[in-house]
Image: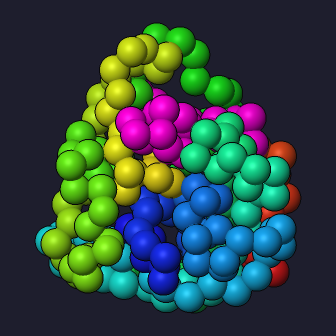
Amino acid sequence: MLQVPGGMCTATLIRPRIVLTASHCVFEDVGGGHDSRGTISGSFTYRLDGVDSEVALDRYSRKRDAMSNAFQSATDVALVRLKEEPRGLTPASLASRSPRRGDAMTAFGYGTNDCGTWDFWKIGTTSTAFTKRRGDYRWGGPVYVTCPGDSGGPHFGTDGAVYAVTSGGRVFGNVSASVAANADWIRTEIVELER
């Protein structure tokens, strides 16, 4: 879970100190504008063996062209570098191709299939009050499995790779950004953030 002053999103560890999320999640924290890189406050919280742990955020990089209509954008991707490696976690691999219609997928997030509680961050609850949820579906199908709070969350294929990032849940049209379609930007920004 990625917590920033503007709210909460889902994020996936893809390198020892880098998480993948939605650009609009970072956009909320840094107050808009068109800067694509900078520092960020907040934390990445994860649960391992029933214990919650938290790692502070350090820097971010977000895709500029995602900001025109972030909640419905195929380019709504961002990377956030953590101040230290989360202990005990293995980074997820990224898919080398875009999902195809009919591919079996699993979306993860903190709001998945629970759209009635999407404004939880406004009431001051803590991260331990949230449970990661999953939604299984077929890519391109009519079933909407994501909700607000899932933004930035991964869509895993049956091979265990991350194929997409949730941009907007059911309320925003169930749009996701393909990892493969944004691969060049992701690779370039990983190099920048790992410096």
Asked if 184 appears above or below 44 in the picture, the reply is above
Q: Write the residue at 24% across / 40% down.
A: 113
Residue 76 falls within the magenta-colored stretch? no
Q: Write the residue at 30% across / 56% down.
A: 118
Report whether 25 appears left or right of 78.
Answer: left
Residue 157 falls within the magenta-colored stretch? yes
Report whether 80 appears left or right of 126.
Answer: right
Q: Quadrant of residue 124?
A: bottom left
Report whether 184 appears left or right of 134.
Answer: right
Q: Quadrant of residue 53?
A: bottom left
Can I make out residue 98 in this image?
yes
Q: Write the residue at 36% across / 84% down.
A: 54
- Number of disc labels: 0
Position of the N terminus, as image quadrant, is bottom left
The magenta-colored residue range is 155-182
- Nearer to us in this view, 60 or 13: 60
Q: Write the residue at 39% across / 15% down.
A: 142
Report whether 91 appears left or right of 170.
Answer: right
Residue 71 placement (x, y as % from top left): 58, 47
Q: Quadrant of residue 10?
A: bottom left
Asked if 59 appears above or below 191 in the picture, the reply is below
Asked if 153 appears above or below 190 in the picture, the reply is above
- Nearer to us in this view, 64 or 179: 64
Residue 195 placement (x, y as % from top left): 81, 80
**Residue found farthest to the top:** 102
Can I make out residue 81 in this image?
no
Residue 127 placement (x, y as % from top left): 26, 76
